[in-house]
Image (cartoon, rainbow, N blue to C red):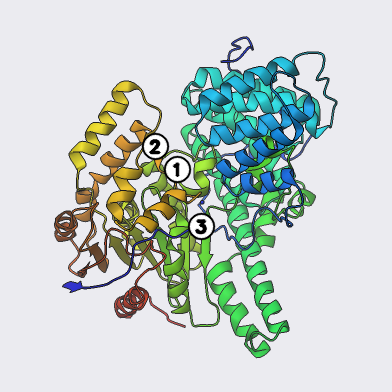
Amino acid sequence: MIICTRSVGPIWPAKGHSSSLPPAPLAPPAPINGRATAKLFGLSAALLAAFVFCLEPALAAEEPVDDQERATLDYLARRPADARRDCEEIITAHRYSLAHLDRPAARVFLNRTACDIALANYSVAQKTLTAIEKFLRSSHAAPGRLDSAGALLADCLLLKAEIAYRNNEIKVAGPLYRASLQEYTDRFGFDSASLAAPLEGMAICYRREGHLGRALSAERQVAEVDFVNMGLGSYRFTETLKFLIMLEELNGQGEQAVVVQDLMVSSLRADMAERLNKTYEDKAEKGEIDAGQLPLIKARINRIVLGRVSLDEAKTRVVKELKVPKELLERPAKKSVRIDFNTWISGRRQAEEPPTLVRINPLVPQKALVYCIHGLGLHGASFDAFALKMADLGFPVLMPDIRGFGGNAHHKGLDKLEPEESLRDIYRSLTSLRKLTPDLPVVLLGESMGGALALQAAANDQDLIAALVCSVPSGSRFGGFSDSMKVARGLLKGKNEIDVGKMIVHKATSDKDSQERWEADPQARLTMSPKELVKFQEFMDQNFKAARLVDKLPVLFLQGGQDGLVKPMGTAELYSTVASADKDLLVVGRQEHLIFEDENCPAWIAPAISDWLENKLRLSDNYKPE
């Protein structure tokens, strides 16, 4: 059935966010000794992707009280231009100069350089780092052990490694990461959270060079450091394990994976449920909700979020089968990390926010969970306006960041667009949902690139979901030839990054305010390598093959009638290829490219999707509404 409608309202993607060292050969990093935690990570772990619930900011910040704190807040909020301006004000106020450095001045210039790297001002950053390194290797610096300001040389080497990594100079970056690791270790010892950033860089360099065993060794050490410093249920530890999964699979190791998988999924879900329950207990105590509703609210939260999780059982299995001391598993996870002006560079990764959001309203009956996959250049939180409306209608929503986007864009190993790996992540997550909440139907919804991911994920295993919703999933784009030529020129010139803003943003929406907000969103990623864009197009070209395999599910396709990015006829042709007899096409007359990932998502969209889903789910023998 084909339905045409008209809608009004602007489109808006929702907010959330050369070395002086000798060229030493890459070698496996020295092991972190003396901890029983090594047994936990010397495993193979084909972990299923799990929920990560963002309830609080990563940085528990107070009101800024001085220039350094204001700069820190701007930096952690992904406002590098503002943070750089803050650093410039400090430099001017203190009359600091690269020609006459001392340790306080070196710290400010290093932090300004971190901003330059974030802004891709690599030549300026490199010149600054050369001057700082020369000073730090002189007798005037003399840093002391356990002194955060004494990590200046380590930070300098880490930033030089970052520039080389971003310029795809892996053979330069690897030794610099290793040298930085040694400096951090000398200053702070083997347990410091500062070790994670250079270890993470080493792991991805080893992987890029094909040294998979060394990459696995380095990433296991990252997991140890994150576990010791962040705890079992922390987001950062979970994200590290995601890359560890891939490396273990590449190394052909898959033993004992179920044990670790159950532990991670159980700990994260238990933490989510605990925090949500506490939220509504507080609401009841303040009189915001009827205290008599609490038992029902908690039952709904536990059904949706906790599912069939037993954290105690998972811990028991780990203690018994992996011989990990129980006391290690009882260490509480840190929910936030305080980063100050001296720890921007090595501490940033510990302060990142989770790349997955969940929206649920436990005050209403729960019907089905909607798993949303975002489009190219966007991130999970782009669905937030739509998700809040769906949650109020009884459809909790899960909104992960796909590899290469949102929070993942800042986690090495997960920072590149890899559609095939993203498909595996989605499969693991859907499998986990099916296992832990078998009585809750799961609806797969994707928009643009996310629509293609949803379509191909459904084709891989239709039994994991109850329905499929694809918005503008076609790879047939306006100006496709000129865009392809731009990518081809980038490949020939060896360009590391191409700005795809005009290729995407200005075609997705004609609204100037929406364009500016999208381009200013700190979680949006609008620069990609030519190789990533080639992978993207090759992946989109698989849509028709996948559509022919989707033959058992109810399917809904949506297309904006005023779409300036994806050709409406391309979506119509793809829709006609879907094998399922139970399919509908909704053409939204006045809508441009984005329908769901829109801060001003049309008011009728969520109720319309809710009605369509309820009608389809009622026909399922397995549907058990609350």
First in sequence, mark 2 or 3: give its number.
3
Whether residues under marks 2 and 1 lie with C-beta atoms below 8 angstroms apart, the answer is yes
Q: On residue 454, which mark appears?
A: none
Q: Name the residue located 19 percent from the left edge and 43 percent from the top edge.
A: 479
Q: Is residue 214 above or below residue 541?
A: above
Along the horizontal axis of the image, is 388 left or right of 114?
left
Q: On residue 528, which mark appears?
A: 2
Mark 3 neighbour density, 10 Å: few (under 14) some (14–19) many (20 or more): some
Provide the secondary structure element on which disc 3 rests.
loop
In this rendered view, identify the residue nearer to me: 9 or 164: 9
Inspect the image, locate mark 3, and give the three-letter code of the amino acid beneath it: Gly
Between the C-alphas of marks 3 and 1, the distance is 16 Å
Whether residues under marks 2 and 3 lie with C-beta atoms below 8 angstroms apart, the answer is no
First in sequence, mark 2 or 1: give its number.
1
Along the horizontal axis of the image, is 580 left or right of 319?
left
The x, y position of residue 334, in whole percent, is 72, 53
Residue position marked by numbered label 3 in the rendering: 16
Q: Is residue 76 above or below residue 615?
A: above
Front tag of 2 and 1: 2
The x, y position of residue 546, in whole percent, is 24, 51
The x, y position of residue 484, in whole percent, is 23, 35
The x, y position of residue 264, in whole percent, is 61, 53
Between the C-alphas of marks 2 and 3, the distance is 20 Å
Quadrant occupied by the N terminus = bottom left
In this rendered view, identify the residue nearer to me: 172 or 50: 172
Q: Name the residue located 19 percent from the left edge and 50 percent from the top edge.
A: 544
Q: On residue 404, which mark appears?
A: 1
